[in-house]
Image: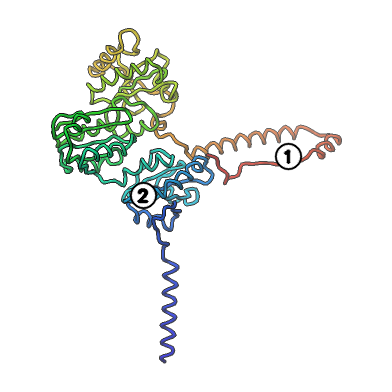
Amino acid sequence: MITKMRLLLIFGFVLLIHFCSVNAEPSLSVDGKVLVLDESNFESAISSFDHILVDFYAPWCGHCKRLSPELDAAAPVLAALKNPIVIAKVDADKFTRLAKKYDVDAYPTILLFNHGIPTEYRGPRKAELLVRYLKKFAASDVSILDSDSVVNKFVEEADTFFPIYIGFGLDSSAIEKLAIKYKKNAWFSVAKDFSEDLMVSYDFDKVPALVSLNPKYNEHSTFYGPFEGEFLEDFVKQNLIPLVVPVSHDTLKLLEGDDRKIVLTIVEDEDEERSRELVKLLKAAASANRDLIFGYVGVKQLEEFAEKFDIGTKLPKMVIWDKSDDYLSVVGSESMEGEDQATVITKFVEGYREGRTIKKTVSGPSLMKFIHGSFDIRMVYFLVFIVAVVMLIQNINKGDDEQHRIPNQDQVHHASSVPEVENKEYKAGDKED
């Protein structure tokens, strides 16, 4: 009886070990390598790490293949941070349920999960720049800077990817909520101890003060209060983007979160000297009209966007655009030719505010599709379908022609002597990027 009981206990113990080993998820660790995720370990990875960058890729995608070694190089550097950032990848072509759950329809799609919450990664893709960009997400919501040297080092290491906000003589609690809200868009900090020399360097003459720096565009702004309510947030929001925005795919996505209308200036070429001089005038107008966003685009740089605003008229020209498929032209200000451009800009803004406008619709496809334009796998399937239909029609026509031809014996003999050409049909599993 005792022997049978022991055997039963041993058998039960073995079954328990086997059950646990079969059902246990593989442990996930920060080892400096790119984690390979699938449907069995994805949720565990997202919940295990505070910060994890996930590359949803397809094996056939050329862009994905170029990105892969960059992620491999960045992974050990990010894993070594005080608050590590993990890099992972998912074969979205294979694990389609995961791809569908996170609305992945273009490759590569890169999502950054901060404490389980995903946001689309829009930063650089070279390893060194990717590391510098991502460091911000592992940093404190509000960094505390306790000396002149620490302030200068913070600004230097923050680089040029994001605007920088530094509160001088300001308690961190005053900007903490905004720092959390806009963490993915900017650096936030407060300086506790600083000299008068630093006040001169950062161009403020009293405290408390919130200084905004945008190193990429060499812009600087100072806010002296009030430090509550909408005034503070308005200052932060207005300085998340440069005074005059150069229009690109990236900046258009950045503008989506701002509800201000855009004074859009269209020029022939952004790099021409006269265009650069025009941008200086636009900056002056933007400083005086912070309730509007001022932007510019060159036909040479982004023709597929600029041509949607009737560029048949003489350039440069200005329009009012609200990021929809409609825009406004101002009566009497259809072109910037004639008077000096500073006067034209002033009259254009006045005309808009007085309601002397004509509503127009952009030409061509929706601008929303342009803003979110990226390589879309659905487009591949559509193109494949079109190609298949064309080939089918050609084959049908070819068959009809052959039915009307009656070959003689010499033709039959000659045809049988021609080597058979290999038929390379497009297969359902083949894809291109």
Give the amino acid type for the residue marked by disc 1 in the picture.
Val
Q: Along the polypeptide, which appears first: circle 1 or circle 2?
A: 2
Residue under numbered circle 1: 421
Badge nearest the viewer, 1 or 2:
2
Q: Quadrant of residue 277?
A: top left
Residue 102, given in percent of the width and then of the height, sits at: 39, 47
Residue at the (15%, 39%) spot, across then down: 170
Residue of label 2: 85
Residue 260 sits above or below residue 12 on the image: above
Q: Give the farthest residue toward the bottom.
A: 1
The chosen color scheme is rainbow
Q: Where does residue 400 sit, x and y in percent of width and height?
A: 71, 34
Viewer-side residue, 169 vs 176: 169
Residue extending farthest right = 410
Mark 2 residue element: loop
Image coordinates for residue 36, horizontal then vertical, percent: 45, 53
